[in-house]
């Protein structure tokens, strides 16, 4: 049996003090999760200012938003395993330190390359923080406390994801977008002190050390998902099949004619991910540590819960990416006003997330997840069917509130359901896998929904300009500028003399693009709803289904 330092039962006289310390540690971990979730969404509202200040293209903007989630997703499982081996609090503290340093670098960035690099480093720190907190909660809390703890953890994720834009708007309005990153310095220092004093240290003592981490699997995962996200983001720039412009990197050039590099990159991503599955199966058969334990996916709730998590994050991060761009492009709304428009999302998530634990104890966590998914689908469909060029923040607010209510219910208990049947020895790896599913959904969601938005914007604007008296070359230039600026060029058209027709066409095109992106999001969330209907109470299985113990758990029992 592996020696575990998770927690030893306290003496009766110290039980109350130990209980208080455990919940105080929960607060520290929740604040750590809140920090990284805020920075996953805060860029959405800051993006228009950053685009203007640094002269970014649409691709730059998508990379600044998605590289964080991409690196985050790529490293979650190996760092989750590292926490199992070397101590989850230790990995949490290291992650907060890396994240804080990266935030300072982002605040000081002078160009798109520096900012993208700082955001990637933030993703490294975040990938240490998330699985360390999740696996600690999974190891420390049991029984009815477990549902309450996951309710706190999940509601903070969903609520802070929505409060991120509000915080970004306030900081941007007061001191500029750089302060939205710089404020992480005092917050990070406070978290470091709190973790050392209050967070319990948990680990599974197994042989292997660094050899217990599957480095080939981590590399294949990072490269495979990186290639997929890269292809989705750059498709609109270099062409989805036929090359539209030359491409060069590190001295290697790709011509502007013939096949585009995008399908090659996408195919490379698929091949690398297929290789990941082959490598992981071979390592598991040989009794070697694996990054992606495929036997975990035989656990029904783990399988369905992870897939649903990915789809939920596609919707959430995709919406938070496009809605600020729509509001700014059509109304010229300031960052603070954009934040207030999204505030109902945060309010709904906090309201429902706070009571999700009690509902889970009464009706079952799986029923809470399913109810939340229904609300999310209805909210996004309602938004898609009502958005127009005259829609402002107040018009979005009711749908954002309904979406937030659903998100709070779903996020609060989906993690609980997904991990409930996972053996404790696999907590770090399973937690990392669950968080990876979220972040892969976030990265792919920003890339996919952002691509639908940008492509739809270009097509709609091109079609509308054909009915104007503008010469063809001018029409092409306006359409290109609107698409490349992520819609913000629409405000320049409103200020330009004699461009009233083009400005109104831009507003209507932004509404069309937002509608198309929202309908795509609703379809993805509907698929997540279908998966959530297959969730069952912890330990419940259909005939013929089993909850196998993964090889790593069996190895630990020897």
Image (spheres, helix red, strand yellow):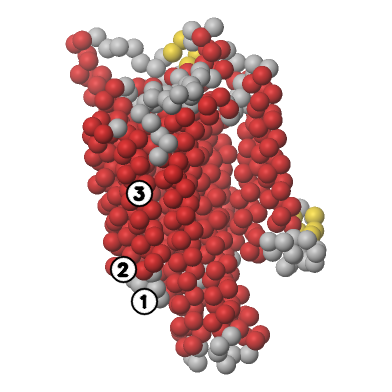
Residue 349, given in percent of the width and then of the height, sits at 30, 48
Which residue lies under the disc numbered 1?
Answer: 390
Given this view, does label 3 or label 1 mark the residue nearer the observer? 3
Which residue lies under the disc numbered 2?
Answer: 395
Residue 340, given in percent of the width and then of the height, sits at 31, 62
Does 16 sit above or below residue 509? above
144 left or right of 378 in image: left
Q: Are marks 2 and 1 in contact (CB under 8 Å)?
A: yes
**Splitting the image into 4 quarters, where does residue 403 fall?**
bottom left
The residue located at (54%, 82%) in the rendering is 464
Q: Secondary structure at mark 2?
A: helix
Q: How far is disc 2 from disc 1 in space, using C-alphas?
A: 9 Å
The residue located at (54%, 40%) in the rendering is 73
Q: Secondary structure at mark 1?
A: loop
| Picture quarter with the C terminus | top right
Considering depth in this image, is 533 or 484 the residue closer to the camera? 533
Residue 114, given in percent of the width and then of the height, sits at 58, 54
Label ID, residue 374: 3
The crowd level at tag 1 (other Cα within 10 Å; few <14, some 14-19, many 20+) is: few
Q: How far is disc 3 from disc 1 in space, using C-alphas?
A: 28 Å
The residue located at (38%, 53%) in the rendering is 377
Question: Is residue 412 among the parts visible in the rendering?
Answer: no
Upstream in sequence: badge 2 or badge 1: 1
Upstream in sequence: badge 2 or badge 3: 3
Residue 127, given in percent of the width and then of the height, sits at 50, 37
Q: Are marks 3 and 1 in contact (CB under 8 Å)?
A: no
405 left or right of 467 in image: left
70 left or right of 23 in image: right
Question: Is residue 284 among the parts visible in the rendering?
Answer: yes
| Count of picture labels | 3
Does 180 sit above or below residue 70? below
């Amino acid at each position: 049996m592996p020696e575990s330092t998770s927690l030893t039962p306290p003496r009766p006289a110290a039980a109350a003090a130990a209980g208080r310390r455990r919940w105080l540690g929960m607060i520290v971990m929740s604040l750590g999760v809140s920090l990284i979730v805020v920075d996953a969404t805060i860029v959405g509202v800051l993006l228009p200012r950053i685009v203007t200040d640094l002269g970014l293209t649409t691709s730059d903007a998508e990379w600044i938003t998605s590289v964080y989630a991409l690196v985050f997703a790529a490293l979650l499982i190996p760092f989750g395993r590292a926490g199992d081996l070397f101590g989850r609090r230790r990995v949490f503290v290291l992650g907060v330190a890396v994240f804080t340093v990266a935030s300072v670098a982002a605040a000081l960035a002078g160009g798109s390359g520096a900012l993208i690099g700082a955001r990637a480093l933030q993703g490294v720190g975040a990938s240490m923080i998330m699985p360390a907190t999740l696996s600690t909660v999974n190891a420390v809390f049991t029984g009815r406390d477990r549902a309450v703890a996951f309710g706190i953890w999940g509601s903070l994720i969903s609520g802070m994801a929505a409060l991120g834009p509000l915080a970004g708007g306030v900081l941007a309005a007061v001191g500029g977008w750089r302060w939205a990153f710089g404020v992480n310095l005092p917050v990070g220092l406070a978290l470091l002190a709190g973790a050392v004093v209050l967070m319990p240290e948990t680990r599974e003592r197994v042989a292997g050390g660094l050899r217990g981490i599957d480095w080939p699997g981590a590399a294949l995962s990072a490269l495979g998902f990186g290639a997929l996200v890269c292809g989705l983001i750059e498709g609109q720039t270099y062409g989805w099949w036929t090359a539209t412009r030359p491409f060069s990197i590190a001295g290697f050039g790709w011509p502007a004619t013939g096949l585009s590099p995008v399908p090659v990159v996408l195919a490379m991503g698929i091949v690398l991910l297929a290789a990941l599955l082959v490598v992981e199966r071979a390592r598991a058969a040989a009794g070697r540590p694996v990054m992606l334990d495929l036997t975990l996916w035989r656990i029904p709730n783990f399988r369905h819960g992870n897939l649903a998590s990915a789809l939920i994050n596609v919707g959430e991060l995709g919406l938070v990416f496009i809605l600020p761009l729509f509001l700014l492009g059509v109304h010229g709304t300031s960052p603070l006003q954009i934040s207030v428009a999204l505030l109902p999302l945060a309010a709904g998530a906090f309201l429902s997330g706070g009571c999700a634990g009690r509902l889970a104890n009464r009706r079952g966590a799986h029923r809470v997840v399913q109810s939340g998914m229904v609300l999310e689908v209805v909210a996004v469909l309602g938004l898609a069917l009502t958005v127009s060029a005259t829609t402002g923040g107040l018009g979005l607010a009711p749908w954002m509130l309904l979406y937030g209510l659903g998100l709070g219910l779903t996020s609060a208990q989906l993690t609980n359901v997904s991990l409930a049947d996972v053996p404790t020895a696999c907590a770090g790896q399973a937690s990392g896998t669950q968080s990876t599913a979220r972040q892969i959904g976030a990265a792919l969601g920003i890339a996919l929904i952002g691509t639908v938005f940008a492509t739809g914007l270009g097509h709609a604007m091109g079609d509308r300009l054909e009915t104007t008296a503008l010469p063809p070359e001018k029409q092409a230039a306006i359409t290109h500028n609107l698409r490349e600026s992520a819609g913000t060029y629409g405000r320049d058209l409103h200020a330009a003399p004699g461009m009233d027709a083009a400005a109104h066409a831009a507003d209507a095109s932004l509404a069309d693009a937002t509608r198309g992106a929202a309908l795509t999001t609703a379809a993805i969330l509907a698929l997540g709803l279908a998966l959530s209907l297959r969730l069952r109470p912890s330990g419940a299985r259909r005939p013929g289904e089993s909850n196998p113990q993964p090889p790593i758990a069996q190895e630990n029992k020897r």
